[in-house]
Amino acid sequence: MNPYILTALLFGLGLGTTITFASSHWLLAWMGLEMNTLAIIPLMAQHHHPRAVEATTKYFLTQATAAAMLLFASATNAWLTGQWEIQQMTHPLPVTLITLALALKIGLAPVHSWLPEVLQGLDFTTGLILSTWQKLAPFALLLQIQPANSVILVALGLASTLIGGWGGLNQTQLRKVLAYSSIAHLGWMILVLQFSPSLTLLTLLTYFVMTLSAFLVFKLSKSTNLNMLATSWAKAPAITALTPLILLSLGGLPPLTGFMPKWLILQELTKQDLAPTATIAAMSALLSLFFYLRLSYAMTLTMSPNTLAGTAPWRLQPSQFVLPLAVGTTTTLLLLPLTPAAVALLVL
């Protein structure tokens, strides 16, 4: 893609998110979300592959539906209460509609079906933008409206953690596994959104760091499915040795970074007398952990038949820029000791 066009599209992505962040009026927020969608569509379709075009079309239709729902709900709110302010959401009908529209935007269960299909049709770089940056604007709106109906948020959260775990069990395509991983993590964030918004933000940031590392590892090893992971030893032995730790961090295993948000969320849910909810969420984390272990096994404990030509690539200089991967991997593995500092910041 032409670098000028790429710069314009990335600028559009940033501007759309910033407008939604800064807006207090529903029309402005809607406009920011639309800019976001329109800026990423050319990035998704840039390879002109039928699968990429199909993914782009599915994404466009889903986001257009969610945006129409959002506009309808905000107009209904203005009709019922005379308010266009995001903070002034008092009527339960528009609040519920907007919550569901934003759930569709980010891919929460039960309106998640588009996410694995869309992510499967994209390259890893665009998939990374879709899994991280595109979640920011809808989350900013969810944090602002603070839906008073706690049942719907807990139901969405639990459904997402369970479906994110179950859906990934039978997958062999890495991008679909990452999509179900995303659904499960979003479920954890939504569960605790109404009780501790700052904890949701912390979980979102740690999820971004861990997902960045996972996407960059698979991009570096050029692996798109489970079988291709077995050739990673020949391409990048050091990264292959660290990848199981990245995946287990995504699964939330101590003493890795990914354990911190899950631990704090379970603690918060227990404080709110939601011990059964916390138990179901913790059990669903085991489902996710199973498919992360499956990926780790395929990558580090199985070896593909190597010829001399197959073992040569790791001696060459890497052609990709690996600094973001190094930083991402370090933070994915080593931030758990900073939990007291994070808790202190949450209290502030």
Image: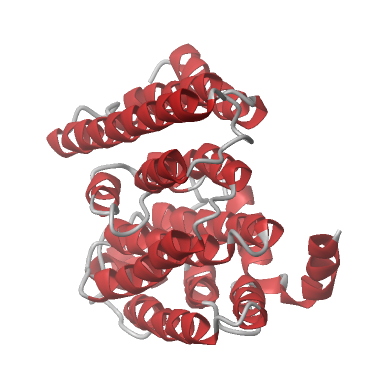
Q: Is residue 36 left or right of residue 226?
A: right
Q: Would you say residue 311 is visible in this rendering?
A: no
- Colour convention of the picture: secondary structure
In the image, is residue 286 above or below residue 239? below
Residue at x 37% of width, y 65% of height: 160
Give residue 123's quadrant in the image: top left
Expressed as whole percent of the image width and height from the top left, the position of residue 1 reads 38, 21
Q: Is residue 123 left or right of residue 342?
A: left
Expressed as whole percent of the image width and height from the top left, the position of residue 203 reads 61, 62
Expressed as whole percent of the image width and height from the top left, the position of residue 146 reads 59, 49
Give residue 162's quadrant in the image: bottom left
Front one among 104 and 169: 104
Expressed as whole percent of the image width and height from the top left, the position of residue 291 reads 34, 77
Q: Would you say residue 295 is visible in this rendering?
A: yes
Residue at x 54% of width, y 77% of height: 252
Front one among 143 and 42: 143
Front one among 339 and 305: 339
Q: Dividing the image into 4 quarters, which one contains the C terminus?
A: bottom right
Residue at x 29% of width, y 42% of height: 122
Q: Residue furthest left?
A: 50
In the image, is residue 125 above or below residue 163? above
The mark tally for this picture is: 0
Residue at x 51% of width, y 62% of height: 150
In the image, is residue 239 above or below residue 63? below
